[in-house]
Amino acid sequence: KEKAILEATSRIEEWENRIAELSAMSSRLGTEYKNLQEEVDKNQGSMDESMALRKKEVAKFHEEEKELFNSLNSVKSAQIVLNSSSFLQRPSLQKLQVLASRQADRLSDRA
């Protein structure tokens, strides 16, 4: 009977030690979880800010692109008008065509 009591006491001590180890591990993991959750929240906030900024940049880009294409179309239209105009003197017309062509090249390089 004493042997059984000693064995049971020994097992109780082992289980108490195991419970203490698991409690410490649980506490450590709880702290790690909290820290990781804070980091995730911080990163999510940064990502949301970055996405908002990116959307603004894309909208600005599309607006500028639209303006450039409108300018390019205006230059092309002017060039067509200049090519078909007979009221301008030929040397002046050639100079204007060169200028219009250069402007069109610059605008298409930007786009």
Image (spheres, rainbow, N blue to C red):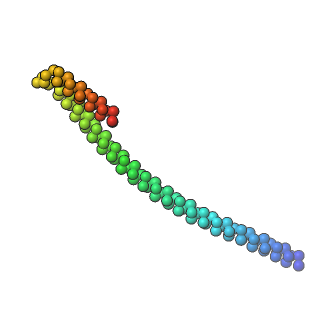
Of all residues, the one furthest to the left in this rendering is 87
Q: What residue is at 60 percent from the left and 66 percent from the top?
A: 31
Where residue 10 appears, as percent x and y from the top left, is 82, 73
| Horizontal side of residue 25 vs 45, given as left or right | right
**In the image, residue 6 above or below residue 49:** below
**In the image, residue 3 above or below residue 79:** below
Where residue 24 appears, as percent x and y from the top left, is 68, 68
Q: Quadrant of residue 107?
A: top left
**Observer-nearest of 52 and 96:** 96
Where residue 15 appears, as percent x and y from the top left, is 76, 71
Q: How many marks?
A: 0
Where residue 59 appears, as percent x and y from the top left, is 34, 47
**In the image, residue 44 above or below residue 31:** above
Q: Quadrant of residue 108?
A: top left
Q: What residue is at 78 percent from the left and 73 percent from the top?
A: 13
**Observer-nearest of 79 and 44:** 79
Quarter of the figure with the N terminus: bottom right
Quarter of the figure with the C terminus: top left
| Horizontal side of residue 101 vs 47, given as left or right | left
**Observer-nearest of 3 and 81:** 81
Q: What residue is at 39 percent from the left and 53 percent from the top?
A: 52
| Horizontal side of residue 20 vs 50, given as left or right | right
Q: What residue is at 26 percent from the left and 31 percent from the top?
A: 103
Q: Quadrant of residue 90?
A: top left
